[in-house]
Image (cartoon, rainbow, N blue to C red):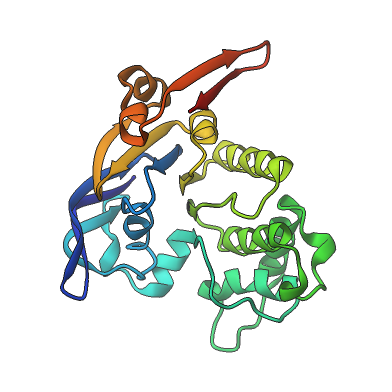
Amino acid sequence: MLEFRNVSVSCGRTPILNSVSVSFPKGCITTLIGPNGCGKTTLLQCLNGVSTVTSGAVFLDGEDYLQLSLRERARRVSFLPQTRTVIPSIPARMLVEHGRFPYLGFSRKKTEKDVRIVEDAMNFTHTFPFAGQSVDTLSGGIRQRVFFAMTLAQDCDYIVLDEPTTYLDPYGQKEFLDMIRELKAQGKTIVLTLHDLNQALQVSDRLIVMKDRAIVAQDTPSKCLESRILEKVFGVTCKQFSDQDRTYYFFQ
């Protein structure tokens, strides 16, 4: 289990999050949702060091996560950020290989296992055909998949994805969510943020609802719908439509 206990985060002297406690059960897909600026990304960035924890603690399977070395953290939790300021001008395969860096020695010499994991990640994300193409020349959607492949190449049991469907067309979003379900079936623990409430309800085992930089609900999608917390937080009305395949949710 990944657990935040009374975590506070500040930027300089400005408090951003105050005493947040939330847990992410092992083997589940847990999605953080909430209005823009509610603190979702800030909370998750405690895991990759972009956000600085000023008090409280983060535990991973009972260990103090923040006391682990950066290399050990990268072996335990892989993180796909929402935005990147620099898009490298290197072949896609080389970028995916960066996911193996936490396991390589000073020489950065890859083993057969490293090569296999990289190829498996690219095949899983359907990016192997672009292996030799420079990342900065790829479309936004394919580039997002390549970064996702790099994240998977870390071969972590915990995968954190901040707005992973950004830049993807509707079919690409569906395919991405299918990949997330497959990762769960493989035993991975998935933590992600999504703005699309319908997607969050369809893919998640649990929802973490945030508003005004605080947790206002932690429950299953069905319980969140029953309590109408989503309608209260987002100021919308939820309508449901069911067919022979599944139930769809519309918010307006």
Relative to 162, residue 112 above or below:
below
Indicate the position of residue 87 as horizontal and vertical percent values: 63, 76
**Viewer-closest of 231 and 9:** 231
Percent position of residue 17, x then y: 21, 57
Image position of 136 with respect to 185: above or below: below
Q: Nearer the viewer, residue 184 or 42?
A: 42
The residue positioned 31% from the left and 67% from the top of the image is 51
In the picture provided, is 167 more to the left or to the right than 24? right
In this rendering, position of residue 116 left or right of residue 16:
right
Q: Would you identify the image quadrant in which residue 245 lies?
A: top right
Q: Is residue 177 left or right of residue 45?
A: right
Residue 92, horizontal then vertical, whole percent: 73, 71
Q: Quadrant of residue 37?
A: bottom left
* Residue drawn where x is 40% and y is 32% of the image: 206
Q: Please give the name of the residue rendered at 56% of the width and 58% of the height, measured from the top-left corner.
A: 155
The residue located at (44%, 59%) in the rendering is 77
Q: Quadrant of residue 207?
A: top left
Q: How many marks?
A: 0
Q: In terms of depth relative to the viewer, which is nearer, 81 or 184?
A: 81
